[in-house]
Image (tube, grey):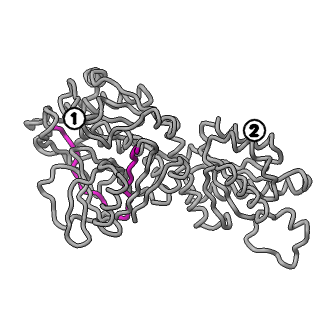
């Protein structure tokens, strides 16, 4: 999912007071700064220079246009000169995309011996941006504020992080989520207010009967071709290969993937849930199919956990183009020696984008669900700093939790564990992180990402207006 088809717009504020020569200079500089940001390896989206705005009408028109443009994920504003902020009220009131306030100036250093009043009138971001900053605070506009010279790599990285978060938010405004069955019976944390989620986050969460999915699976074609793709992509266990005693299970899994993929594509759905308590005519709980769909960018939540499915899709978009994987995850069991380790896994559904090496394709018993043993990909996650994120509904608000962790190799081999897994050490240690997570009401389902940084999560929470609890 490259982000090169998404845009952020850069616009400078000014006014007619300074005359056409100043305005022409501002227009030119906006184009040059936008071109530099567009070319920066730290900014994953296209950056379009939209020139200078000089009046309330121009500002409102631009803000409305940004909200209506399907590719525009955010607006970057910079007061190159003094722009009276009351001109911005109507536009900001109508703005529907995330906002970044860029506090910069065109020249990195002052030409001390050459400064006259013409220079002062043209280069007064220090003055103009304070005017805008007051109004943004006065209006309660959620925004990011980034200060420094526009050509600095660190500033460009911060803009890049914000643009990733803006793209995640942009995705949620159009996201459709399919629920096959309900949430797992008697479980509390996977419940939530789906109407409020659409009001606050934009994601539309709708239910579908498992019978509809079963019909799509039964109608699927191309099973043989997909089985060959499995054999080329993974180390397929001997009993699943052609002539093996469980080859029919591999074909069933392939048919489920084909049907599930066709169902989602036909409805424009980019995230989904299922539950082992409602499988209808499915012969096995979807395993490899869910894993491969996540690897293609789909959001997923097990046991009907639509909030985690929404969150995973958003983080998949935010992670686009970065090394490291992003996956549905669950804290499963602990090693309490020393600072403590978490063994994270799930019954089947961990995304192979995390895999440190070529996954194996295996079939093992599953004690729940009452169906045939499901096919799944088995692997260990790669190493590195990561973040574990959860979205919970507290009744009167949504809360985002982000726990910084370090994914590490298992202290010993896990030859009998029949699922994909990750081992991590929470910061500062397991006991402190777990106590904080429990006190904050964090769920057992999470999104683990080695590609999305805490800075991106922080920017996303600010854009979405969601309360954020950070554990580090």
The residue positioned 25% from the left and 36% from the top of the image is 184
Task: Give the residue furthest to the front.
Answer: 396
Q: Secondary structure at mark 2?
A: helix
Tell me which residue sits at (35%, 67%) in the image.
Answer: 427
**Residue at the spot x=31%, y=60% of the render?**
382
Query: In this view, which residue lies farthest toward the left?
Result: 245
Indicate the quadrant containing the C terminus: top left, top right, bottom left or bottom right. bottom left
Query: Which of the labelled discs sits on residue 225, or is there none?
Result: none
Query: Does the magenta-highlighted stretch encompass residue 376?
Result: yes
Of residue 290 and residue 304, the one placed in the foreground of this image is 304
> Can residue 264 be found in the magenta stretch?
no
Name the element at disc 1. Answer: loop
Image: 262 above or below 139: above
The segment highlighted magenta reads: 374-394
131 lies left or right of 364? right
Relative placement, left or right, of 308 versus 339 is right
Q: Nearer the viewer, residue 342 or 466?
A: 466
- Left or right: 431 as drawn, with respect to 337: right
Residue 61: assigned label = 2
Q: Nearer the viewer, residue 391 or 417?
A: 391
Residue 201, image x, y percentages: 50, 40
Q: Mark 2, residues whose alpha carbon is within 10 Å: few (<14), some, or many (≥20)?
A: some
Q: x, y (%) of residue 219? A: 28, 20
* Overall secondary structure of the magenta section: strand
- Whole-number angstrom distance, CA of label 2 to CA of label 1: 50 Å
Residue at the spot of label 1: 276
């Amino acid at each position: 999912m490259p982000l090169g088809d998404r845009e952020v717009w850069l616009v400078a504020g000014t006014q007619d007071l300074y005359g056409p020569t100043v305005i022409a200079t501002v227009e030119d500089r906006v184009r040059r700064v936008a071109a530099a940001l567009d070319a920066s390896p730290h900014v994953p989206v296209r950056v379009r220079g939209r020139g200078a705005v000089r009046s309330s009408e121009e500002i409102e028109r631009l803000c409305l246009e940004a909200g209506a443009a399907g590719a525009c994920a955010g607006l970057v504003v910079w007061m190159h000169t003094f722009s009276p902020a009351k001109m911005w009220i109507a536009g900001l009131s109508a703005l529907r995309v995330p906002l970044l306030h860029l506090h910069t100036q065109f020249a990195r250093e002052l030409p001390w011996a050459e400064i006259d009043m013409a220079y002062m009138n043209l280069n007064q971001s220090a003055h103009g941006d304070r005017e805008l900053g007051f109004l943004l605070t006065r209006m309660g506009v959620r925004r990011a504020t980034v200060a420094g010279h526009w050509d600095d790599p660190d500033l460009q990285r911060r803009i890049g992080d914000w643009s990733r978060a803006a793209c995640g938010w942009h995705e949620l405004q159009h996201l459709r989520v399919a629920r096959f069955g309900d949430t797992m019976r008697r479980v509390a944390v996977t419940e939530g207010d789906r109407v409020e989620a659409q009001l606050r986050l934009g994601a539309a969460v709708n239910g579908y009967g498992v019978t509809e999915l079963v019909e799509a699976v039964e109608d699927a074609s191309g099973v043989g071709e997909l089985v060959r793709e499995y054999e080329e992509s993974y180390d397929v266990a001997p009993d699943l290969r052609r002539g093996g005693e469980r080859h029919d299970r591999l074909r069933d899994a392939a048919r489920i993937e084909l049907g599930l993929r066709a169902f989602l594509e036909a409805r424009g759905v980019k995230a989904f849930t299922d539950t082992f308590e409602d499988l209808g005519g499915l012969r096995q709980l979807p395993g490899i199919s869910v894993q491969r769909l996540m690897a293609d960018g789909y959001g997923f939540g097990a046991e009907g956990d639509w909030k985690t499915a929404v969150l995973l899709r958003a983080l998949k978009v935010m992670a686009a183009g970065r090394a490291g994987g992003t996956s549905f995850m669950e804290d499963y069991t602990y090693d309490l020696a020393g600072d403590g380790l978490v063994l994270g896994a799930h019954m089947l559904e961990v995304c192979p984008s995390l895999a440190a090496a070529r996954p194996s394709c295996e079939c093992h018993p599953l004690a729940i669900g009452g169906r045939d043993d499901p096919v799944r990909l088995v692997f260990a996650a790669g190493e590195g700093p990561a973040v574990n994120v959860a979205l919970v509904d507290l009744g009167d608000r949504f809360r985002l939790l982000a726990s910084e962790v370090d994914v590490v190799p298992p202290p010993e081999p896990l030859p009998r564990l029949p699922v994909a897994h990750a081992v991590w050490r929470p910061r500062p240690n397991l006991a402190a992180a777990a106590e904080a997570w429990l006190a904050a009401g964090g769920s057992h389902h999470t999104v683990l990402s080695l590609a999305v940084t805490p800075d991106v999560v922080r920017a996303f929470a600010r854009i979405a207006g969601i309360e954020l609890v950070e554990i580090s």
